[in-house]
Image (cartoon, rainbow, N blue to C red):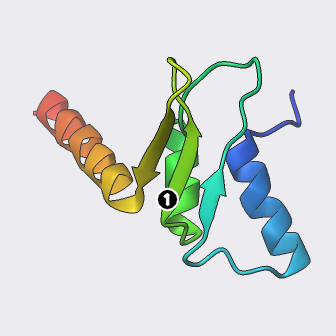
Amino acid sequence: FCPSVHAEANTVINAARLGVSTIGAILYLCNNGGVAGGPCHLCRRVLLNAGLVACYYRGPNEEIVEETKDYWIGLENEWMDKRTRLQK
């Protein structure tokens, strides 16, 4: 058992604990020396359901990457389409 959660989920949890609305919020991820990349599949779902509209993070070439809720929704739709095709 590991009680830790990803930074994205932890952000939403702490905002809820403090009574801070995340609707319309933007998340800035800092990945100093860590793995470059944006929110994982499950974290995207957390962010969408919490009402966040975008996330910025450092990409693999040190560039700043923006992911928006529309991008996340597109990824979720692709994922659902693949699952639906595999189940047929």
As rendered, which of 26 and 21 lies closer to the eye? 26
Quadrant housing the N terminus: top right
Q: Is residue 42 left or right of residue 5?
A: left
Residue 18 horizontal/vertical position (percent): 90, 76
Quadrant housing the C terminus: top left
- Label 1: which secondary element: strand
**How many marks can you see?**
1
Residue at the location (59% across, 63% down)? Answer: 26
Residue at the location (71% across, 81% down)? Answer: 21
Residue at the location (49% across, 59% down)? Answer: 54
Residue 64 horizontal/vertical position (percent): 52, 37
Residue 45 horizontal/vertical position (percent): 50, 53
Residue 43 horizontal/vertical position (percent): 58, 46
Report the residue marked by disc 1.
54
Q: Is residue 39 left or right of residue 35?
A: left
Find residue 79 and report its image quarter: top left
Above-or-below relation of 72 to 48: above
Find residue 42 and report its image quarter: top right
Binning the other alpha carbons within 10 Å of mark 1 as few (below 14), some (14 to 19) or many (20 upward) gives some
- Disc 1 residue type (three-letter): Ala
Q: Is residue 23 left or right of residue 80?
A: right
As rendered, which of 14 and 66 lies closer to the eye? 66
Residue at the location (58% across, 39% down)? Answer: 57
